[in-house]
Amino acid sequence: MAEKSDDIWIGFDLGGTKMLAIAYDDQWNGLGRRRRKTRGREGSDNGIARIGSTIERLLDENDLVGKKIRGIGIGCPGPIDLNKGRILTTPNLGWDDVDVGDFLKKKFNCPVVVLNDVDAGLYGEYQFGVAKDSRCAVGIFPGTGIGGACVYEGTILQGAGISCMEIGHTRISSNSRSSGIDMPGTLEAEASRLAIAAEAAKAAFRGDAPVLEKQVGTDLADIRSGALADSIKGGDKAVQRLVEQAAESIGISVVNVIHMLCPDTIVLGGGLVEAMEDLIVGTVTRTARKNVMSVYKDRFKVVAAKLGDDAGVQGAAAWAKFKIGD
């Protein structure tokens, strides 16, 4: 029997509002975790310094200082230069061309693998969660924007040296609404939490969403996933319809993906789905089954992600192990 190693793997998820680092042993037992909030658009230099200090605190607080770090996997929002381990752009954080991989390699003297955060989240669900044993799994994660990912026969689908599956920036509507890029009518413009919140604020201002107006008002920053869910529970039919329309748009994007890749599992994740799982998963499923070619109707399932924040962290660490090797 092989001797058990004391070496560790570290997974890191850099989100728009939080950082989460977890250390694992070779059997994926969690050895400790450290969570911190991001500081908005604090600048990339301060941001990557906080990434480094978060990992240092993780090691120090869990008596892991001195353990050999076999590798670090870090999931980051936005497109990634896979060869250089560089964040190309993160609209939510305001970072551009950040060499996070090189920084972590030098700081911790270990291999580092940088990948897109939704890729990491879906890979976590593929390895340990609801997409396990899928031949092809596609992830769609609506939030401030909408991220996409695909795991095909055990490998994250990626471009030549760059991350891909930017499903939020695919056009699905003739609507003139935009989402920060020149092309209007994208999935992100139609179905992100930000898009829903903007329309919900209008409804509250007009008096069509009294529960939402009473609970959080019309400030876009306060209309988050939980507030939308509470509004619907309180009887705001206008808000419910907005969420259903967004889910229908996601359902149409699912149809497009099925016609191209025929995935057996579609994973919906993120805070918006967590807050309204039945409504969103049910609407996406009905829309997709109604519109997909009949030969594909019974060849896929739509499920909600189940690992929560740990999906991206564990997925990043597992992908790093896959890429680095034992």
Image (cartoon, rainbow, N blue to C red):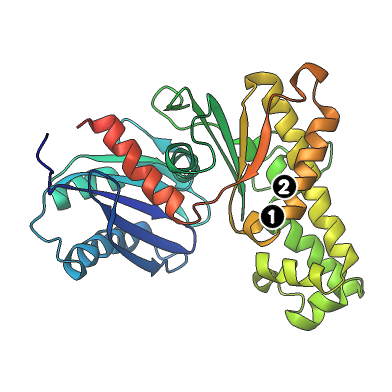
Q: Nearer the viewer, residue 141 or 213?
A: 141
The amino acid beneath tag 2 is: Val
The disc at residue 281 is: 2
Report the residue that reaches farthest toward the bottom. Answer: 214
Q: Quadrant of the N terminus?
A: top left
- Residue at coordinates 47% horizontally, 45% vertically from top-left? 121
| Secondary structure beneath label 1 | helix
Instruction: Please name the residue that numbered disc 1 is placed on.
Output: 277
Marks 2 & 1, CB-CB < 8 Å contact: yes
Using residue 298 as the reference point, say whether residue 323 is left or right of it.
left
The location of residue 179, given as percent across then percent down, is: 68, 48
The location of residue 29, given as percent across then percent down, is: 29, 52
Using residue 105 as the reference point, say whether residue 100 is left or right of it.
right
The location of residue 68, given as percent across then percent down, is: 11, 49
- Vertical placement of 180 versus 55: above or below? above
Using residue 98 as the reference point, say whether residue 56 is left or right of it.
left
- Vertical placement of 234 versus 31: above or below? below
Determine the image quadrant of residue 325: top left
| Secondary structure beneath label 2 | helix
Determine the image quadrant of residue 173: top right
- Vertical placement of 78 versus 196: above or below? above
Q: Nearer the viewer, residue 296 or 96?
A: 296
Query: Can residue 316 be seen from the camera position used here?
Result: yes
